Amino acid sequence: METKNWRERAASQFDCDKNPVRSRDGMVVTNHPLASAAGMEMLAAGGNAIDAAVAALFALSVVEPMMVGILGGGMAHMRLADGRHTILDGLSTAPLASRADVFRPVSDRMPDYMEVAGRENAIGPKAMAAPGNLLGWCQTLARYGTLSLDDVLQPALRHAARGFIVTPYLSECIAEAAADLARDPEIARRFLKDGRALPAGSRLVQADYAETLRQIAAEGPDTLHGGALGRELVQYMARRDGLLVMDDLVSYRTIDRLPVRGSYRGLEIVGPPPPSSGGVHVIQMLNILEGYELKAMGFGSADVLHLIAESLKIAFADRKSATADPAFVQVPVERLIDKGYAAGRRARIQLRHAQDWDAGVVPGDSPNTTHLTVADRSGNIVTSTQTINSLFGARIMVPGTGLIPNNYMYLFDPHPGNTLSIAPGKRITTSQSPIIVLDGGRPVCALGLPGGLRIFGSVLQTLVNLIDHGMTLQEAVEAPRLWTQGQQVEIEAGFSGAARTELERRGHRLQIMAHVAGGMNAIAFDADGWMTGAACWRADGTPMGMGGGHARGNVRFWPDQAPADVVRATGQK
């Protein structure tokens, strides 16, 4: 495989909305330009990729408040300069006061299987699980960063205190959630004006959140996990009949996990382990697809799309029955990523007919997430997916703090007795897939995206675009996508009408979508040290690369010491 094709090609396969960025000295790709700039500020100040990633995440909590916050959770996949890979699991856990029957389900069937009386698992205080983001970000910085917490918080502080301009994307997200936001006076005052979403172009100032960030800068994560900020949160929860108490915050722990590893056409695929289903099932699907000549079939062909859809259905059938918090469920990771197991599943695929793979019911995680990918010139790489789950989380705000609680309880099965049922302290299961690809031990690509259940299928398709179809990185992240978990196939309009017609003839029920999953952020690495950053059209994603650098050698001189030819050329006396 010629990996150079990921960066440069003589002719594009299709037109892209955005342009990639190249650099040798550092790259930050996030879903907002101000967050990318925050990360780049850390690199310019002499920090490393970990400093940049944490600064960008705090900035995203300001400029993407609908997606990420310190009361959320997530996973970070880090490859350190010495070649070690580590996964920091900061996913949320069910409150200690919760139990399997804490909610009253309204149905045992899809599409209402996850719904409960009063929407209590999705909206309001009972929807909040114990948060892991703040502790995870601070621990990551303390272990692997070089700058102080106060340093990396400065960009977020500026944008919260002074305000920033609302993008069309943020305004549309507010409008989508406006009916629920209007039910909580505190969050409504922040994001609604006369009952309508803040318009694009308006300035959003979050002075209370700026004070919260200053408190974090002074006291660290302890202010939430046992300190003053935590007391404000649990007192609010008690007033509103929430499940979260101080013991949840004090007892919460992040977990360091080893990644799962697989291979595809000679490349090593490294991703997060359970409770993320992303790494396991990306590798599983690649194992299935490795038995086909996808390149010869052609990108966007009915054959390739059919095989991807069938592989997704197989993965979701296994995810439903086997993938959850390994502290509560024995997850058969080795079997799921075994090439022999994949071969057996592959043998049952019929190329001309869609099949029912008994996907059954799969609890849904949220498409309203964010992702960043960061690298520095020393070889540190961070690819991290973070979320408060649904758009604006529980759609409430803790008064005086600017904090938006997550609604992670919606990710648990509200029916007792199942793999993903609620249990005190149980970690949520996610599809987050921060993936790093290696060639002979050398990183060649790092990527990820938001998108809930649609994440790992989108990662799979991007890897196939790069490895099989020879796309550039920009093409691969922007290319049309499809997704299914066993019912209808969601498919973007960018695929040809002929391919869609043939899929329907084979038995797939199609639903044309404006987009599948969210904005992917990726970095590709050349053997000579160059990096290429790319973000796709599905979000406000912006790659920023470090250019220029220090002066070459000792070139400083005063005018009266300048060589004669320089004096003549510049007019200096």
Image (tube, rainbow, N blue to C red):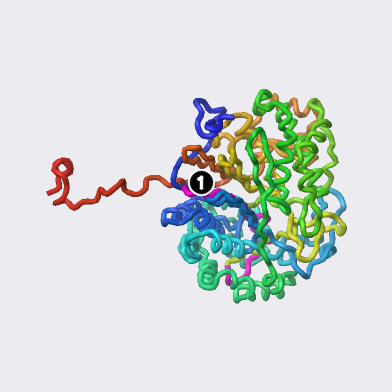
Image point 12% across, 49% down: which residue? 573
Relative to 496, does residue 392 appear above or below in the rendering? Answer: below
Residue 507 visible in image: yes
Whether the magenta-drawn stretch holds residue 500 is answered as: no
Query: Which SS type dominates the magenta stretch?
Result: loop
Determine the image quadrant of residue 134: bottom right
Whether the magenta-drawn stretch holds residue 376 is answered as: yes
- Asked whether, in this view, residue 438 is left or right of residue 505, the answer is left
Image point 62% across, 32% down: which residue? 467
Determine the image quadrant of residue 471: top right
From the top left corner, tell me how far across and down residue 222 is, in percent: 60, 72
Relative to 312, does residue 198 appear above or below in the rendering? Answer: below
Image point 49% across, 41% down: which residue? 531
- Asked whether, in this view, residue 195 is left or right of residue 287, the answer is left
Q: Which residue is mark 1?
A: 542
From the top left corner, tell me how far across and down residue 30 is, in percent: 54, 49
- Asked whether, in this view, residue 534 is left or right of residue 91, the answer is left
The quadrant of the rendering that contains the N terminus is top right
Determine the image quadrant of residue 353: top right
Q: Residues within 10 Å of mark 1 (few under 14, many from 20)?
A: many
From the top left corner, tell me how far across and down residue 58 is, in percent: 54, 60
Image point 31% across, 48% down: which residue? 551
Name the residue nearer the viewer: 356 or 197: 356
Name the residue nearer the viewer: 85 or 435: 85
Name the residue nearer the viewer: 168 or 435: 435
Name the residue nearer the viewer: 115 or 79: 79
| Magenta region | 372-401
From the top left corner, tell me how far across and down residue 78 is, in percent: 59, 52
Q: Which type of secondary structure does the marked residue at label 1 adopt?
A: strand
Residue 62 visible in image: no
Q: Amino acid at mark 1?
A: Thr
